[in-house]
Every structure is written in C-alpha cells, then in structure tokens.
Image (tube, helix red, strand yellow):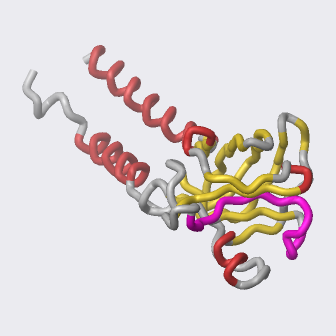
C-alpha cells in the first residue's frame, strides 16, 4: 500500500488542527499545588493564577486551602508583591509572582491588608555580604521566621484540568479509531 493511500486527508488535517490548538503557547489560567518548608514548618496551599508564556512564571490571583504542618491554617485572601509591600512602607500592591522552578519569586499572602497578623511570602533582599538573595518570611499561624529561601524546600506544580485530560483522551480515541479502520482495510 502506498503512503498516500494510508492517510485520510480530512482526518489528518483535523488532527493537525487540534494538536496545533492544544500545543500552541498561550498564557493560561491554571491551578497549582504549592508547598514550602521553612525552619518554622511546612506550608501547603492551592494557588490559582495565570501561567505566563515562558511556561514558568505564574501571576497569582488567589491562594486557598492553606495548611501549616498538616493542619488547616487561616485563610489568606490578600495577596500582592512582597517587594512592593516593603518599598511602599506597608501598602499591599503589585503583582504576586511565583514560578514553577523557584526563580523570580515576589509574593506575599496575608489575612488582612495591613499584613500584620497571619502571613507568608517570598521577597528579594541583600544577604549579609550585600549579594541579592531571595528570602522567606512568615508570621502568626504560619510560624515566625525570616530566612534565606531554600530551593530544595519549594514546590509549585500544575494541577491537570479535567478539560485538558478529556482533550488528550479524545485525541487518543480518534487515533485508536483510525488505527482500527486501517487494520480492517
């Protein structure tokens, strides 16, 4: 059988269109699992945000389901840029940023706009030698610490969306149907 006869042109075009639309890079809203362990303990949460075109940076829109050392912790509905918070003298502004690989973190989550009770976050500062470094801070129900960020203790992973899984399964199903038709013919 020639190669030309083994392809179903309309089906091939349809599959190529679906694959292109599915794999094209776009900034997209997503849900992430977050975890960080500091000297005070381990914080976990669900993070909602937009994964940027670099497929690493996440602009955070909310954080929920927070725990500290495995126990439910107070909600932190107020988020922003930790660096902007420090520069402004305590005004919660700016874009909260996390990343999949732990680079470029600039994030604070608080239980109130003054960020004077329960909070945690990542900031940029200078270490004792004057080198730029990322730090971690937490207060209140999230333990009280200010320390250097440890990459090995950080995790931010994408939670697969049901629509994505369904889309991949449907493409696989079409592929199996095509394979079955080819074997019959």
Furthest residue toward top: 184
Is residue 180 depicted above or below 96 in this figure?
A: above
**Residue 110's x, y, as percent?**
83, 64
Residue 35 point in image, percent of width and height: 69, 42
Q: How many marks?
A: 0
Q: Is residue 2 left or right of residue 36?
A: left
Residue 21 position, x and y percent, is 40, 54
Question: Is 101 a magenta residue?
Answer: no
- Residue at point 7% right, 26% down? 2
| Quadrant assignment, res 158 | top right
Residue 147 image point, x, y percent: 68, 53
Q: Would you say residue 159 is visible in this rendering?
A: yes
Side of 35 where 73 appears, left or right: right
Residue 50, visible in the rendered structure: no
Q: Residue at x 28, y 47 (%)?
A: 13
Q: Give the residue displayed 85% in from the left and 50% down from the top.
A: 142
- Write down the quadrant of residue 159 in the picture: top right
Q: Residue furthest front?
A: 129
Foreground residue among 25 and 21: 25
Residue furthest toward the bottom? 88
When the figure is inspected, residue 73 is found, relative to residue 140, above or below; the finding is: above
Range of residues picked out in magenta: 112-126
Look at the picture and state if 24 lies above or below 33: below
Q: Residue at x 28, y 15 (%)?
A: 183
Q: Is residue 121 magenta?
A: yes
**On the rendered image, what quadrant is the C terminus found in?**
top left
Rendering quarter of residue 174: top left
Q: Assign the N terminus to one quadrant of the image.
A: top left
């Amino acid at each position: 059988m020639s190669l030309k006869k083994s392809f179903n042109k309309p089906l091939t075009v349809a599959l190529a269109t679906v694959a292109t639309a599915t794999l094209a890079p776009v900034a997209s809203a997503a849900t992430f699992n977050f975890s960080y362990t500091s000297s005070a303990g381990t914080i976990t949460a669900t993070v909602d945000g937009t994964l940027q075109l670099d497929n690493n940076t996440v602009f955070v829109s909310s954080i929920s389901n927070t725990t500290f050392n495995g126990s439910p912790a107070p909600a932190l509905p107020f988020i922003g840029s930790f660096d902007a918070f420090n520069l402004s003298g305590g005004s919660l502004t700016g874009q909260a940023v996390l990343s999949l690989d732990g680079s470029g973190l600039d994030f604070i989550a608080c239980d109130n706009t003054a960020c004077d009770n329960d909070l945690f976050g990542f900031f940029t500062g200078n270490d004792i030698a004057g080198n730029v470094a990322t730090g971690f801070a937490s207060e209140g129900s999230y333990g009280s610490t200010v320390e250097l960020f440890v990459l090995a203790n950080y995790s931010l992973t994408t939670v697969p969306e049901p629509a994505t899984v369904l889309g991949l399964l449907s493409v696989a199903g079409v592929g199996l149907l095509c394979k079955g038709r080819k074997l019959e013919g």
